[in-house]
DNA sequence: CAGCCACGTGAAAACGTTTTCAAATCCGTT
DNA sequence: AACGGATTTGAAAACGTTTTCACGTGGCTG
């Protein structure tokens, strides 16, 4: 039989209420407090969090829903979230959706059943659209990806302009024919595409775009196919770390060296991007800060439920490395 | 006000017990079942998991305690665990300890308070020792790292012999002076050291060993220091992915190329090890399988509490890449 | 046709806490 | 000396479920 608050009370010679007050730092005389604490030690009492939650209506639990924790962006994010949760004496329940709306829906429902304190969530584009019509009894803070305008708090970078910065850099290095590969499941990839397209237009260049499942395999296959078909862009840019990995693999497999044969750039400054060849030029996001900001937003919204919806936009940073360097001009015409 | 089972019952014109039975697939006539299901839809009812857990004494929750989710080994592990949990309709609560025993203790206590169904746990060496004396009311399965012999179920690879395989390979390539860097927080690193030492002895070679905090920074600093002091081993092997990263960085920073100037090898086949230079020779662990096996073990132990303690040992695999290749023999004497 | 069993159902207890409420005690003030 | 207020305590209700138990109904069996 598991020992409960009543057993502690009996041993200490007080009422259960008093034990509860000791646990919750309520008003108790030092005398009784000591007795109770001794009894707790003696009985090896461990509070039952389910009971506590049921009665107090506070779960002290943060939900975290991402597509795949193995994506280093989400790995770092989750670590930051967990740290903040630890600091606030809360637990984190982790959910991977694999960009699968059915799994997403299942987890969203679970979050309501858990009566979580707050949710940090990177929604699929399809679910994000539906998000405006859904009711939640807890704060929902979107990260990395946005929902319907103004429907939820969110923490992102300025994706369109970051993509623009990347394009500007590539063009500045003399690259003209710039292929863009973008994920097809997130609003974020869409915004990065928009930024790419706008920048290309600004420079008077034609775009070349493909939306793909955001996986290394998809990117690798796509570039391999194009190279086999004889295409040879000056540069390729991609909208996230997984695509960047596939891109690099494809180039390597085709025997292309960067930047000699093809320039490469993308989003997410993952560990390996610095180590590979001349280093890969990337947009670095302040991932841990995004996580912390999201937690802050959860807490603020709890404190001030009527606060206006808030979108926190953090600065991203261009990390220039060898992969995007200028090539010696060949005889090939500029267009 | 939140809608409860009673509200559903009232709407459906049945008793709360019947609603509960519908929810739990209990024996209910089709007639009433339909009414109840309609009422559930109408009221937007969501079960309260805290209440359910309190009454049923089942939390359907798996605890996962690792040192740092950002270590790709644990990332992949956690993904496998989460997948298995999803399949069994369970949640996973994720905890990072940063190899900090205090944080570990805190999380272990939390797990008891959560009354979790089972725990998957990679303990620090210091906590692992204490583990034999601790009582848990749920199955504890150790992963990657072991506890006191036979005290808990565990899933690992054969660390000593895997390290031996790595040494044999390096020696086979002609390397003689092999520096070994090992983490100082896990039993696993210790076993890998033992395997290294045994293999070196078998080959009649002197060992050169250092135990470090298992971080990239520590490994990088250590090798940099040694190189600066004029040391130049034939090869360096390390006991995990983080150390491998630091090792590679240090070599690179010192302008050493692998395998020309120094051979490099280690544990954990992370994404980047294949991409870097000639590729890094590593021992690859079946990480996802470790996670799945751990979950299986949790379930088996729940089914058969008296089952003998079980240690599952999975096969690791040597992945040979360029970084360990033989060097052209120089005039330097073999010893 | 009597008896039995299987089945579906509801009333009420139970899970382990926190919280409300009222009672009791103590202190200082008038 | 009496009163008011603050402080500490305990009894009991409440949180939202599942589970136990007993009851009623209907179909079978003998």
Image (cartoon, coloured by chain):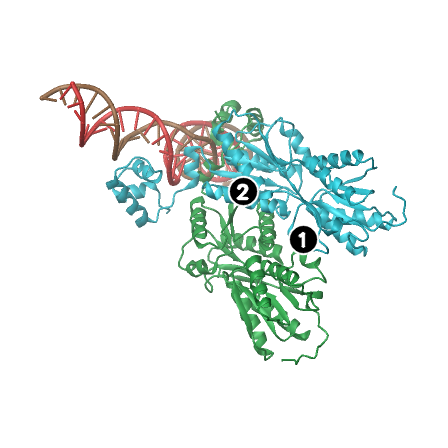
Chain colours: A cyan, B green, C red, D brown
Q: Position of residue B41 (x, y in %)?
A: 58, 27
SS at mark 1 in the image: helix
Q: Position of residue B103 (x, y in %)?
A: 45, 50
Q: Earlier in the sequence, mark 2 or mark 1?
A: 2
Image-based side of B191 in relation to B277, left or right: left
- Please identify the quadrant where the C terminus of chain B is shown: bottom right
Nearest the eye: B60 or B230? B230
Rendered position, B13 above or below B292 = above
**Figure quadrant of residue B193:** bottom right
**Figure quadrant of residue A7:** top left
Query: Chain ID for label 2?
Result: A
Q: Residues within 10 Å of mark 1 (few under 14, many from 20)?
A: some
Query: Chain ID for label 1?
Result: A
Rendered position, A177 above or below B29 = below
Q: Disc count in the image?
A: 2
Q: Are dots 2 and 1 in contact, CB under 8 Å?
A: no
Observer able to see residue A115: no
Nearest the eye: B217 or A119? B217
Q: Position of residue D3 (x, y in %)?
A: 17, 19
Q: Position of residue A104 (x, y in %)?
A: 63, 37
Observer able to see residue B202: yes
The residue tagged 2 is A81
Which of labels 2 and 1 is toward the front?
1
As drawn, the label of residue A274 is 1
The Cα atoms of the two marked residues, 2 and 1, are separated by 25 Å
């Amino acid at each position: 039989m598991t020992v409960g608050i009543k057993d502690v009370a009996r041993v200490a010679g007080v009422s259960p209420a008093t034990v509860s007050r000791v646990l919750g730092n309520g008003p108790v005389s030092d005398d009784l407090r000591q007795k109770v604490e001794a009894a707790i030690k003696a009985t090896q009492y461990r509070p039952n969090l389910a009971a506590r939650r049921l009665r107090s209506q506070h779960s002290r639990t943060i939900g975290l829903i991402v597509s795949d924790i193995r994506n280093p962006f989400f790995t770092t994010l989750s670590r930051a979230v967990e740290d903040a949760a630890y600091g606030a004496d809360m637990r984190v329940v982790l959910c991977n959706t694999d960009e699968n709306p059915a799994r997403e829906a299942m987890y969203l429902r679970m979050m309501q059943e858990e009566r979580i304190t707050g949710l940090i969530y990177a929604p699929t584009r399809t679910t994000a659209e539906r998000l405006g019509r859904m009711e939640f009894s807890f704060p929902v803070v979107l990260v990395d990806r946005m929902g319907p305008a103004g429907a939820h708090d969110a923490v992102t970078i300025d994706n369109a302009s970051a993509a623009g910065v990347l394009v500007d850099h590539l063009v500045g290095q003399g690259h003209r024919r710039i292929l863009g590969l973008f994920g097809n499941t997130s609003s974020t990839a869409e915004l990065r595409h928009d930024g790419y397209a706008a920048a290309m237009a600004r420079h008077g260049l034609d775009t070349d775009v493909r939306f793909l499942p955001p996986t290394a395999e998809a990117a690798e296959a796509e570039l391999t196919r194009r190279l086999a078909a004889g295409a040879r862009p000056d540069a390729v840019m991609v909208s996230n770390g997984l695509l960047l990995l596939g891109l690099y693999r494809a180039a390597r497999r085709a025997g292309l060296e960067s930047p000699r044969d093809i320039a490469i750039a993308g989003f997410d400054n993952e560990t390996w991007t610095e180590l590979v060849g001349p280093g890969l030029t990337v947009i670095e996001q302040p991932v841990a800060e995004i996580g912390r900001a999201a937690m802050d937003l959860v807490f603020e919204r709890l404190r001030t439920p009527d606060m206006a919806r808030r979108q926190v936009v953090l600065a991203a940073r261009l990390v220039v490395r060898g992969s995007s360097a200028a090539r010696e001009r060949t005889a090939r015409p500029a267009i």
